[in-house]
Image (tube, helix red, strand yellow):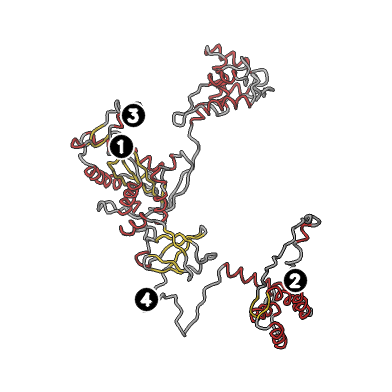
């Protein structure tokens, strides 16, 4: 039939369809599907109305329905509003006319455009992540062991799922502490480490203990895993994002890349491990419950030895342990000793004020910061220990203006003097100019030029600083007020001052009193001079007037 249809000319195919329909007893549409499944590709004329909805539904109307379904969905469960309900809401609100389209046709349109409920609930496309070497990136996560908990002397108890689920929160409240399972996986080798804690909830102290326990290693001869990673991926839990924990990770030179919220695929390795541990290890606890969390962790280490050494990773076709052991010496960063870890956990970042000699003190050492651009005495910098080199070199990291600098201690000379000190009589050292000093020098050069001479006036005396202030008021002079004449009482007694005080006051006004003028003043006024007369005489001398006439007139008036 297919051969005949392909060779048939225009107008001959109907007879072929009728012949085989009578021969097989099948209808025309069924024969068409069979023929197309065997290579028949009929040439169909393109419909003139292709792409046009017969219902007249616009893209805006379709988008409105999609918005109703999407925005009413739940974060975990997904879409909950049916197309029928969305169409009903759209009709009630006048977005779609009654009878314009049926529910089945609207469902088909949504499927054709890839916005049906199934399409909206589907996971978004993602990109796979890769690591460069073992200990390049570690992923860790915590999960409550909802099936098991410790109950006093009874040891490990198994929760009945009929009594412990989300609709019966009171039963969970009866359990004061739970078994929380922490898992860590090396992203490159998928080497696993697991540890259980019997606590009330996640906290940063537990996270610190788990990470340092995993990175310290030494849990079993057959578990060589140890070392500090370069990157850590974790969820945004309160214990993980605490400032103290973030500062602790930064002190160990560990980066924690930011990620989109509600993106569990980012910690996919840890999520997979949680499932592996629950299925392959915890499922055995039903037949042999542990009495203590220590016993549980001991059994878990035994299981980790078996799993990491026997289970081959599909990606590398080798065991996890064998793949992790391909790590090189530069890639293996050994965790610092416990004392340093305690210090950087208790106080991962410190602040210090720069002293006048550009130094800061820290733990019986001094550090010189003159090389940091823009830094000047009195400023505050952030300081943190460098845990990997602190014991040998006592290096620190100084952060200023969002820039980090590695600084070594200055050291000391004989007698405890700073190694940066200048030896008397042998050398001279100067601190680099601060930004303030540079600004002052530029200001002086602007005011005096390159060469400043004694008694030079700034800007060559060209600046106008007097004689312009009254001009600001223009013609707004105030109207003179009538006053009351001052009446001097008849019993007025003039006040006198010593002649030498008067001559000193005159010297301050004219800078220098000639010896002849000095003698004449003493001869004229004697040992003292009346206060008012002294003022008038000084004014006359400063104005190059004859002070003798002023003195005579005032004496006659008195």
Q: Are marks 1 and 2 in contact (CB under 8 Å)?
A: no
Residue at screen point 37% across, 64% down:
390
Q: Nearer the viewer, residue 466 or 358?
A: 466
Q: Nearer the viewer, residue 21 or 58?
A: 58
Left or right of 497, for residue 470? right
Whichever of callouts 1 and 2 sits on the residue coming sooner in the sequence is 1
Q: Which residue is mark 1?
A: 145
Instruction: Kindly state the secondary structure of the residue where label 2 is placed.
Output: loop
Q: Is residue 141 visible?
A: yes
Left or right of 179, for residue 8? right
Whichever of callouts 1 and 4 sits on the residue coming sooner in the sequence is 1
Location of residue 493 in the rendering, given as x and y in whole percent from the top left corner: 66, 71
Location of residue 298 in the rendering, given as x and y in whole percent from the top left corner: 23, 45
Instruction: Kindly state the secondary structure of the residue where label 4 is placed.
Output: helix
Whichever of callouts 4 and 2 sits on the residue coming sooner in the sequence is 4
Up-down: is 172 above or below 312? above
Distance in Å between CA atoms under marks 3 and 2: 85 Å
Badge 2: residue crowd in 10 Å (few <14, some 14–19, many ≥20):
few
Q: Which residue is mark 4?
A: 416
**Viewer-side label of 4, 2:** 2
Q: Nearer the viewer, residue 137 or 253?
A: 253
Q: Which mark is residue 169?
A: 3
Residue at screen point 77% across, 58% down:
472
Whichever of callouts 4 and 3 sits on the residue coming sooner in the sequence is 3
Distance in Å between CA atoms under marks 1 and 4: 59 Å
Distance in Å between CA atoms under marks 4 and 2: 55 Å
Choose top left, top right, bottom left or bottom right for residue 482.
bottom right
Residue lying furthest front = 490
């Amino acid at each position: 039939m297919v051969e005949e249809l392909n060779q048939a000319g225009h107008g001959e195919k109907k007879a072929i369809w009728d012949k085989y329909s009578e021969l097989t007893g099948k209808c025309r549409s069924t024969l068409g599907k069979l023929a197309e499944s065997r290579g028949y590709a009929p040439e169909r004329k393109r419909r003139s109305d292709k792409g046009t909805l017969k219902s007249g539904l616009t893209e805006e109307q379709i988008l409105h329905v999609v918005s109703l379904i999407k925005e009413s969905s739940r974060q975990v469960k997904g879409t909950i509003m049916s197309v029928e309900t969305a169409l009903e809401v759209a009709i009630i609100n006048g977005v779609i006319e009654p009878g314009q389209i049926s529910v089945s046709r609207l469902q088909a349109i949504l499927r054709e455009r890839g916005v049906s409920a199934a399409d909206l609930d589907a996971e978004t496309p993602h990109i796979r992540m890769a690591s460069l070497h073992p200990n390049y990136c570690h992923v860790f996560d915590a999960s409550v062991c909802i099936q098991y908990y410790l109950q006093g002397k009874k040891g490990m108890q198994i929760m009945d799922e009929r009594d412990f689920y989300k609709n019966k929160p009171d039963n969970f409240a009866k359990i004061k502490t739970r078994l929380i399972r922490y898992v860590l996986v090396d992203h490159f080798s998928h080497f696993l480490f697991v540890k259980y804690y019997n606590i009330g909830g996640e906290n940063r102290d537990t996270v610190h203990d788990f990470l340092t326990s995993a990175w310290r290693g030494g849990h079993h001869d057959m578990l060589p895993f140890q070392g500090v990673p370069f990157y850590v991926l974790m969820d945004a839990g309160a214990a993980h994002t605490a400032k103290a924990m973030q500062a602790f990770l930064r002190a160990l030179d560990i980066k924690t890349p930011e990620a989109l919220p509600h993106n569990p695929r980012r910690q996919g390795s840890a999520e997979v491990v949680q499932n592996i541990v629950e299925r392959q290890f915890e499922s055995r606890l039903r037949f042999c419950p542990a009495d203590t969390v220590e016993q549980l962790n001991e059994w878990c280490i035994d299981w980790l030895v078996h799993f990491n050494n026997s289970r081959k990773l599909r990606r590398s076709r080798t065991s996890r342990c064998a793949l992790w052991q391909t790590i090189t010496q530069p890639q293996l960063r050994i965790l610092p000793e416990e004392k340093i870890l305690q210090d950087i956990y208790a106080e991962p970042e410190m602040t210090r004020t720069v002293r006048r000699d550009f130094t800061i003190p820290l733990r019986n050492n001094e550090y010189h910061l003159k090389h940091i651009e823009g830094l000047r005495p009195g400023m505050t910098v952030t300081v943190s220990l460098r845990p990997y080199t602190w014991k040998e070199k006592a290096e620190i990291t100084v952060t200023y203006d969002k820039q980090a600098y590695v600084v070594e201690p200055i050291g000391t000379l004989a007698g405890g003097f700073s190694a940066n000190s200048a030896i008397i009589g042998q050398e001279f050292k100067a601190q680099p100019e601060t930004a303030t000093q540079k600004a002052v020098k530029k200001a002086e050069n602007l005011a005096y030029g390159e060469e400043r001479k004694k008694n030079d006036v700034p800007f060559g005396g060209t600046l106008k600083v007097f004689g312009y202030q009254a001009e600001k008021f223009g013609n707004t002079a105030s109207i003179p007020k009538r006053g009351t004449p001052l009446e001097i009482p008849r019993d007025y007694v003039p006040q006198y001052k010593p002649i030498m005080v008067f001559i000193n006051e005159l010297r301050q006004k004219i800078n220098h009193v000639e010896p002849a003028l000095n003698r004449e003043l003493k001869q004229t006024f004697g040992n003292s001079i009346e206060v008012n007369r002294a003022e008038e005489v000084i004014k006359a001398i400063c104005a190059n007037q004859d002070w003798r006439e002023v003195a005579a007139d005032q004496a006659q008036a008195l």
